[in-house]
Image (cartoon, rainbow, N blue to C red):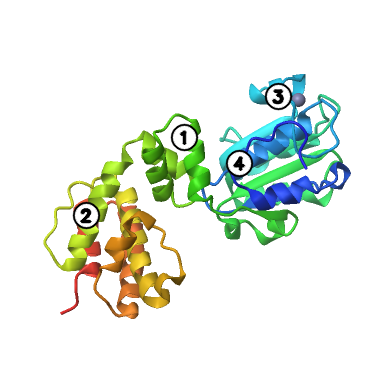
Amino acid sequence: MITGSFDVVGAVGPLRFFGHLAPRALSHGYLMSGPAGVGKKTFALRLAQSLLCVTPKATLLGYCNHCSGCTRVAARTHPDLYVAEGQLKIGDRDGATGFHETDESSARDIVRQLSLHSYAGGKRVFVLGDVDFTREAANALLKFFEEPPADVVLLVTSAQPGRLLATIRSRLIEVTFGRLRVEEIAAVLERNGADPDEARRAATVGNGSLTRAKAFLDEGEGATRDAAVDWFFAAVDGREVDHSQWATRAALEDGLDTIKTLTRDWLVLQLAGSAVPLLASDQTTAIERLPKRDPLVLARALAAIGDAERIARTNVTPALVAGLVRMALAPTK
Ligand SMILES: [Zn+2]
């Protein structure tokens, strides 16, 4: 149940979870986990706004968008909302003087913030979006969990919850987010002014991630993907192929991702037939036309592309990375 607005896309499970939660049953820490780009942080911020909205309402979710709380949240000036992203760390021990802080948002900073009292007399909300806790930062946060202040709510979002310290993760209530549906993404893109056909195509390529679909529309990633798709089908055929359109420093990561998705789909199609939907659904017909290949060989090719992705992050040339992938995909003689 929602009173007022709660503007998110998808998130059926989390909406049900928080929608049925009585405001007084709210815990002091939640972990919002799920793939990148599906709206975990947006949800966390909307939940924060719901908690800081001062218009009285019967439900936990929902805000009015015009009270002093909502206005301050929108302007990111609410004194009881703390938002951090990226690496959260405490610097190296600095001799007898204790810790040396270098980052803008250190865990120490947060622990200090956590010990303050609410400005507006209500809840205080901490949104830690995809933070990478250092061990020291995590330990500092554990102090918070040992004796959490009554009105503090901590919302941690992560695409890789396995990387959180078990001691932190076990103290958070995990709420999982699934991939978005193509229709959901396309609808958002269309609302933002995209042409319906383009919206649909970007949504398909986005593969459940609104962020990726938007990037595809905004940054002309369509060209990279088209080039990588053509390159993939040629490489599988054993044809000598030009990689210059996608194997560049700027486009390499996206190109590899496209090729990996296609290879995964080829393997899935052979193992499961049409029972499992393909990720590159716009390429279904072309993938179905691909020759049969030993699934073990395809699984090895997939692993080799994963290796190539790791190598790509080191200082090797994109051409070399493309060469490795081409060898992995070439027909076996
Ligand atoms: Zn409000």
Tell me which corner region of the image, top left, top right, bottom left or bottom right, holds residue 216: top left
The residues bearing labels 3 and 1 have C-alpha atoms spaced at a distance of 23 Å
Check disc 1 and give the amino acid type. Answer: Glu
Of labels 4 and 3, earlier in sequence is 4
Check disc 2 and give the amino acid type. Answer: Asp
Task: Give me the residue at 34% from left, 52% from top.
Answer: 313
Of labels 3 and 1, earlier in sequence is 3
What quarter of the picture does the N terminus occupy?
Answer: top right
Pointer 4 residue: 41
Q: SS of the residue at dot 1?
A: helix
Which numbered mark, 4 or 3, is in the foreground of this view?
Answer: 3
Q: Tell me the crowding category of disc 4: few under 14, some 14 to 19, or many 20 or more residues within 10 angstroms, Cα based.
A: many
Of labels 2 and 1, earlier in sequence is 1
Residue 315: where, in percent of width, then height? 28, 51
Which numbered mark, 2 or 1, is in the foreground of this view?
Answer: 1
Check contact, mark 2 vs mark 4: CB within 8 A: no
Pointer 1 residue: 190
Q: SS of the residue at dot 4?
A: helix
Q: Is residue 136 left or right of residue 235?
A: right
Task: Give me the residue at 64% from left, 58% from top.
Answer: 165
Is residue 89 something that shows in the picture? no
Tell me which corner region of the image, top left, top right, bottom left or bottom right, holds residue 80: top right
Quadrant observed for ligand 1 in the rendered image: top right
Task: Give me the residue at 62% from left, 56% from top.
Answer: 164
Specify whether tag 2 is near ligand 1 (CB below 8 Å): no
Please give the label number shown on residue 230.
Answer: 2
Specify whether tag 3 is near ligand 1 (CB below 8 Å): yes
The residues bearing labels 4 and 3 have C-alpha atoms spaced at a distance of 18 Å
Q: SS of the residue at dot 2?
A: helix
Q: Is residue 276 left or right of residue 217?
A: right
